[in-house]
Amino acid sequence: MRLFMITDARYKFIHAERGFRPMLFDMQTDPSEFHDLGRSADHQEIIDLMYRRLGKWTRRVTKFDAQINAGKANPSGVGIVLGVYDQGEIDPDLTIKYRGASPDRQA
């Protein structure tokens, strides 16, 4: 599943593929993102605005699905690591940028 996230000065908006509802957070009143406003009828105009912005941004994507899928089959280790709770859940090579090289890897 792919997630797409955009922000502006106030809101953070997340769209998930496969029919999941959007998520919306008011970063001014809820900087810790505890209250998802994605179901709020009072925020529908903001959700619509964020979808328009996301649509405009995604039209700039330069990779086709076949290229993305090929990258999944042969990952290069380049990218963003999201949602990791326990570092033991992922390959240590993907977090080396954040941890620094281990002594056994240095020449």
Image: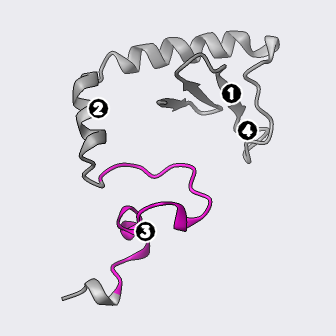
Q: Residues within 10 Å of mark 2 (few under 14, many from 20)?
A: few
Q: Which mark is residue 98?
A: 3
SS for dot 2: helix
Where residue 106 sits, quadrant-wise, is: bottom left
Residue 60 among magenta residues: no
Q: Amino acid at mark 1?
A: Leu
SS for dot 4: loop
Camera-side mark, 2 or 1: 2
Give the residue pinned by disc 2: 69
- Lower sequence index among marks 2 and 1: 1
SS for dot 3: helix
Check the image and report above or below for 7 versus 50: below
Give the residue pinned by disc 1: 24
> Where are the magenta residues, as a range?
78-102
Q: Quadrant of the C terminus?
A: bottom left
Q: Is residue 23 visible?
A: yes
Mark 3–mark 4 distance (CA, rounded to whole Å): 28 Å
Q: Residues within 10 Å of mark 4 (few under 14, many from 20)?
A: few
Residue 83 among magenta residues: yes
